[in-house]
């Protein structure tokens, strides 16, 4: 009898493990399109646009062989008839990388349209001030793929930026990405079927709220990366619903987002002055939320390093020489995670990544709601042996949660679930 029970138990465990290891098929986005030929008139409208003008894009599905480009303009609005009505498609694009590229502009609004299937990024805005992206659906059609462009919405080196009412679908890096920018609001958007749903990278004074982020590999990334001209801080993310981000990572191999394990809700990495509060974060197979240093992505010192080739479209790689960037801090600090609602319907972590295996060995099979890698910098302790407040991590008022301090810098020797040292407060002004 005991032998039968043991065999039954083992079969049950193996069945559960198979179910968890087996990764569901990749999702698809398949809208119906009937293309019209308006390429030349719309190209001319972008090229000849005057300051303080409006480009009205009529209802229809339009196919383009090259990028739509605008440079050095002021007070221009690009307006479609609606997300479902005006579609700019770059399927089979022959010239240019981006679908729509805006650069060196001031007071630009792009709204009420869809952009699809660019060879590179669907909508890139660079070196511009006072930019509004409103009611835009930016997507790659068909089954999601590594061959899809990196970014659906891609403002970089911009100031005073508003992204609202948009949808981002199928990006092989980040759906809604903001890089090296200041004074940013990202609100009331949906991001799904991307590697990363929403990403704030090396950006400051950023507010991310009222967004729905689901069915990505990772939900929300707040990153600071080395060897860039601008470093980020002061980011608030609140009142977002971040859930079911469990799809297989289809990022370009070698890129930093390709290291994000499927089943990740939030990652705060090497960024200071971050507040995560009043969010609903649930149903992730690896981790609901995490705070980590850049070091956790860098291969061990004893591991043989391969010479890396540049990635397409300027995608960022993990850089082992980050320590040579004297302006860069690889460690998070002044991070507050408070008053969120965590929930998880999964009982066994994903077993296709190292974190899932770590939770089995060290965390009694439980998937953490919040994990901190606890890799500390050399100046973590001040001269009086008290912790440096610059590296303060606070976790408070999140209900009953599974918390993990990993001690990843010491081979997890002091892996702990003790929250006492992290129940604190940190404040900063946005």
Image (cartoon, helix red, strand yellow):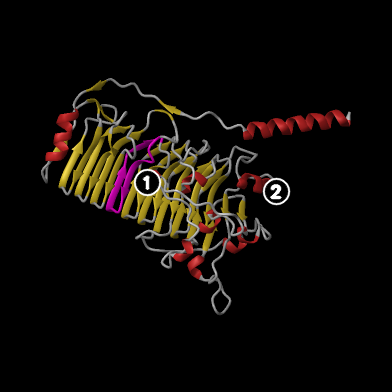
Q: Is residue 184 magenta?
A: no
| Residue 245: x %, y % from top left | 50, 39
* 55, above or below 321, in the image: above
Identified at 79% across, 29% down, the residue is 8
Identified at 54% across, 57% down, the residue is 396
Element type at mark 2: helix
For the residues labelled 2 and 1, the Cα–Cα distance comes to: 35 Å
Horizontally, residue 7 falls left or right of residue 260, namely right
Q: Is residue 152 magenta?
A: yes
| Residue 417: x %, y % from top left | 65, 55
**Which quadrant of the rendered structure holds the C terminus?**
bottom left
Q: What's the mark number on residue 361?
A: 2
Residue 54 occupies quadrant: top left
Horizontally, residue 206 falls left or right of residue 78, namely right
**Residue 242 visible in the picture:** yes
Q: Residues within 10 Å of mark 2 (few under 14, many from 20)?
A: few
* 278, above or below 429, in the image: above
The residue lying toward the viewer, choosing from 75 and 119, is: 119
Q: Residues within 10 Å of mark 1 (few under 14, many from 20)?
A: many
Element type at mark 1: strand
* 300, above or below 25, in the image: below
Horizontally, residue 114 falls left or right of residue 219, namely left
Residues drawn in magenta: 148-170
- Number of marks: 2
Dot 2 or dot 1: first in sequence order is 1
Q: Which residue is mark 1?
A: 177
**Residue 293 visible in the picture:** no
| Residue 277: x %, y % from top left | 46, 52
Magenta-highlighted stretch: main secondary structure?
A: strand
The residue lying toward the viewer, choosing from 32 and 340, is: 32
Residue 374 occupies quadrant: bottom right
């Amino acid at each position: 009898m005991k032998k039968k029970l043991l065999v039954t138990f083992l079969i049950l465990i193996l069945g559960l493990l198979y179910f968890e290891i087996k990764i569901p098929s990749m999702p698809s986005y398949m809208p119906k399109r009937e293309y019209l030929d308006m390429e030349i008139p719309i190209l001319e409208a972008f090229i000849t646009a005057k300051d303080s003008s409006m480009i009205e894009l009529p209802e229809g599905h339009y196919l383009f062989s090259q990028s739509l480009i605008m440079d050095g303009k002021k007070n221009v609005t690009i307006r479609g008839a609606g997300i479902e009505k005006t579609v700019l498609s770059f399927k089979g694009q022959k010239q240019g990388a981006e679908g729509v590229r805006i650069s060196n502009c001031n007071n630009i609004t792009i709204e009420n349209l869809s952009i699809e299937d660019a060879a590179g990024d669907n909508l890139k805005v660079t070196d511009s001030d006072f930019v509004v992206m409103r009611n835009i659906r930016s997507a790659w059609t068909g089954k999601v793929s590594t061959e899809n462009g990196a970014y659906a919405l891609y403002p970089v080196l911009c100031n005073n930026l508003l992204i609202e009412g948009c949808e981002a679908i199928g990006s092989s890096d980040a759906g809604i990405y903001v890089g090296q920018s200041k004074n940013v609001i990202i609100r009331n958007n949906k991001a799904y079927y991307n590697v990363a749903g929403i990403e704030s990278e090396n950006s400051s004074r950023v507010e991310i709220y009222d967004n729905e982020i689901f069915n990505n590999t990772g939900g929300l990334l707040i990153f600071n990366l080395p060897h860039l001209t601008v470093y980020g801080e002061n980011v608030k993310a609140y009142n977002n619903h971040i859930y079911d981000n469990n799809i297989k990572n289809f990022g370009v191999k070698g890129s930093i987002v390709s290291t994000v394990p499927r089943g990740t809700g939030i990652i705060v990495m090497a960024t200071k002055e971050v507040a995560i509060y009043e969010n609903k974060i649930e149903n992730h197979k690896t981790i609901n939320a995490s705070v980590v240093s850049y070091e956790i992505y860098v291969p061990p010192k004893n591991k043989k390093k391969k010479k890396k080739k540049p990635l397409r479209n300027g995608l960022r790689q993990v850089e082992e020489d980050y320590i040579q960037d004297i302006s860069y801090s690889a460690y998070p600090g002044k991070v507050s995670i408070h008053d969120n609602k965590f929930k998880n319907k999964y009982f066994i972590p994903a077993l296709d990544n190292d974190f899932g295996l770590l939770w089995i060995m060290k965390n009694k099979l439980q998937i953490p709601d919040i994990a901190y890698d606890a890799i500390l910098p050399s100046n973590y302790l001040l001269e009086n042996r008290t912790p440096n407040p610059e590296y303060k991590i606070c976790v408070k008022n999140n209900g009953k949660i599974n918390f993990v301090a990993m001690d990843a810098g010491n081979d997890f020797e002091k892996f702990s679930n003790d929250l006492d040292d992290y129940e604190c407060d940190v404040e900063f002004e946005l």
